[in-house]
Amino acid sequence: MVLSPALRKQAGNCIFLNIVRVVLINLINYYMTDPIADYLTRLRNAISAKRRVVEVPASNLKKEITKILFDKGYILNYKFVEDGPQGTIKVALKYDSVNKVNAIKKLIRVSSPGLRQYTGYKDMPRVINGLGIAIISTSKGVMTNKEAADLKIGGEVLCYVY
């Protein structure tokens, strides 16, 4: 079948647009396969850009992680905004008033959907010899490594914070 130059150009544009659609769908699926990694990356990017407030899409697990970060003094404040079906979390980052250094030095994702990392209460990880925290998802809820060790329960190691 012979196509005229105008039809060939139009067909080429359709193929190009379909490829762009597939790439965009793959990118969206890539980011949403690990929402905890996306949450930590948004915090890391806001810290490196010296932002005061960062907004992230909400989920129950992200809300629990945010509460732990606030209780341990890594963030200044947070607010859960219920807009739409999912809602958002507004996190106010904590900076030192003198030298403008953030309270969070590192956020490291440990367990991922492709490789889950579990630990028992006897083998609980110590982050920087006890100066940092590990956030653990247990059968009793999301908590720090110290709280999980005190309750003698293990779980999935979500991330390290220091």
Image (spheres, rainbow, N blue to C red):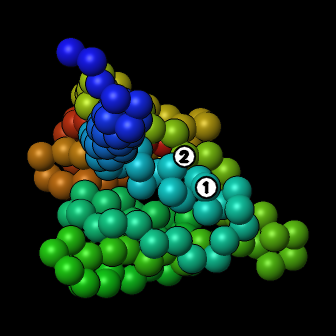
Whichever of labels 2 and 1 marks the residue nearer the N terminus, that label is 1
Does dot 1 land on a helix, a strand or a loop?
helix
**Residue farthest to the right?**
99
Tell me the residue at 66%/71% (across/down): 51
Where is residue 148? Give x, y as percent. Answer: 28, 46
Q: Horizontal and vertical percent for residue 12?
A: 38, 32
In this rendering, position of residue 44 left or right of residue 155:
right
Q: Residue at x 20, y 80 (%)?
A: 84
Q: Residues within 10 Å of mark 2 (few under 14, many from 20)?
A: some
Q: As displayed, is residue 111 above or below residue 132?
A: above
* Figure quadrant of residue 49: bottom right
Q: Can residue 149 be seen in this view?
A: no
Q: In percent of the image, x 12 and y 46: which residue is there? A: 139
Residue 27 location (% of width, % of height): 37, 40
Circle 2 residue: 107
Which residue, given by chain and number where applicable, does mark 1 sit on?
Answer: 45
- Disc 2 residue type? Leu
126 or 64, which lies in front? 64
Q: In this view, does 42 lie to the left or right of 48?
A: left
Q: Which of marks 2 and 1 is in front?
A: 1
